[in-house]
Amino acid sequence: MQGIAVVCEYNPFHRGHMRHLGLLRERFPGACLTAVLAGNFVQRGEPAVLSKYERAEAAVICGADLVCELPFPWSAQGAGFYAGAAVSVAARLGCDTLSFGSETGDLDRLLSAVKRLESPEFADGLERAESGSMRSADSHIAVLRKVYASLYGEELPAGSNDTLALEYLRAISRGGYALSPLCIKREGFWTATRSRELLRAGELEKLKEETPEELDGFYAERRPVLPDAIGPVALNFFRTHGQAELAVYADLGGGIAGRLCAAAANAADYGEFLSLAATKKYTHARLRRAVLAAMTGTRECDVKEKPAYTSLLAANARGTEFLRQAKKRGEITILTRPSDGKSLDGTAARQFALALKAESLWALAAGESPADQMRKGPFIG
């Protein structure tokens, strides 16, 4: 069976997401539409507005066949590690196509940009720039874009989806995966940011404008998680730990640990904490990811690994059959329920233990217990 993978957060699921799945179904009517869904913490370093199981259920209701997890810590990483891990999961599940949204909608342009980004010429230019004055003020992506423009006389595609698309293509190339890229141009006014805001504000009538009819009433039954729900715990954590002991964790080098510790000592709440630590180079999203890394004990070596496991979050009959074939191949361990993680060993066990720390934080944000998380299971539609 053909497998078409989509890397996603569905935070929450809206009409734009359904449009993407609908276009794929029209083109590949017999394929298994497989979503590799970010777990309970997402790329911005925030707790997802709804649990991974709720978002996966919405996806299957609206056209996906199978939803498997991109687990922590990769779900809460910058574009490179996030995309690399997700592509790895999709390929080892047995998918042969990776579809992604793009502001440009121009696959040839994206592939050309990737060829340039992977060239020795660009690597040399980026190294020179990052060792110079630009690095002291600008973020890595800002420096990268400046180098690209100076070398090639045009701007690197800069939309948020284009940025991820470039990283998906780089990951396919670097990993040698047999995944054919399929680019779909983003259209429509729907955004996950607006949908989150409406859901958290309880503006359910306005949310209907963003939501597929298939999900009528779905969000009314859910309790959204606030983005700063772990704030007090995080603030206290950085008030009671020192720079030297925190600098060993992922994203906390280069002075970030010191900035966060100093900010915690002077901030009255989580929002002020992030604002005091933020600069052009250290964005709020990067700082949130650093906070999660410190609180879970995530090191750079952890995020550089490939996920040794994924979890089944939701499926229909077609997705269940595709999953059966994936398990038979055995290229990646697939957990059916969180409690199955107790039987893992080696790298998978170590990775699962790290994810459990994040799950405990998300449970705190959601007003649940860690035991509640372990009792959850996939939606079968």
Image: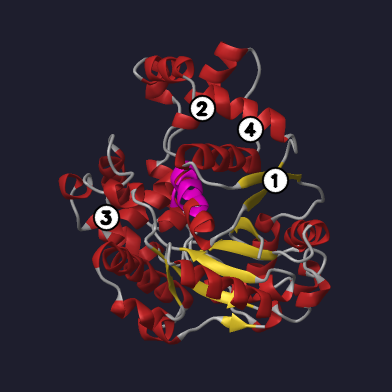
Q: Earlier in the sequence, mark 2 or mark 3?
A: 2
Q: Earlier in the sequence, mark 1 or mark 2?
A: 2
Q: Would you name the residue on which mark 2 appears? A: 142
Cα–Cα span, label 4 and label 2: 10 Å
Identify the mark at residue 158; answer none if there is no mark.
4
**Regarding mark 3 in the picture, which secondary structure is present there?**
helix
Are the two marked residues, 4 and 1, in contact with CB atoms closer than 8 angstroms? no
Q: Around disc 4, counting alpha carbons within 10 Å, would you say few (fewer than 14), some (14 to 19), or many (20 or more)?
A: some
- Residue ID at (64%, 51%): 97
Q: Horizontal and vertical percent for residue 231?
A: 40, 62
Q: Earlier in the sequence, mark 3 or mark 1?
A: 1
Q: Earlier in the sequence, mark 4 or mark 1?
A: 4
Q: Around disc 1, counting alpha carbons within 10 Å, would you say few (fewer than 14), some (14 to 19), or many (20 or more)?
A: some
Cα–Cα span, label 3 and label 4: 33 Å
Kind of residue sitting beneath label 2: Ala
Identify the mark at residue 365; answer none if there is no mark.
none
Of the 4 image quadrants, the one containing the C terminus is bottom right
Kind of residue sitting beneath label 1: Leu
**Regarding mark 2 in the picture, which secondary structure is present there?**
helix
Q: Would you name the residue on which mark 3 appears? A: 238
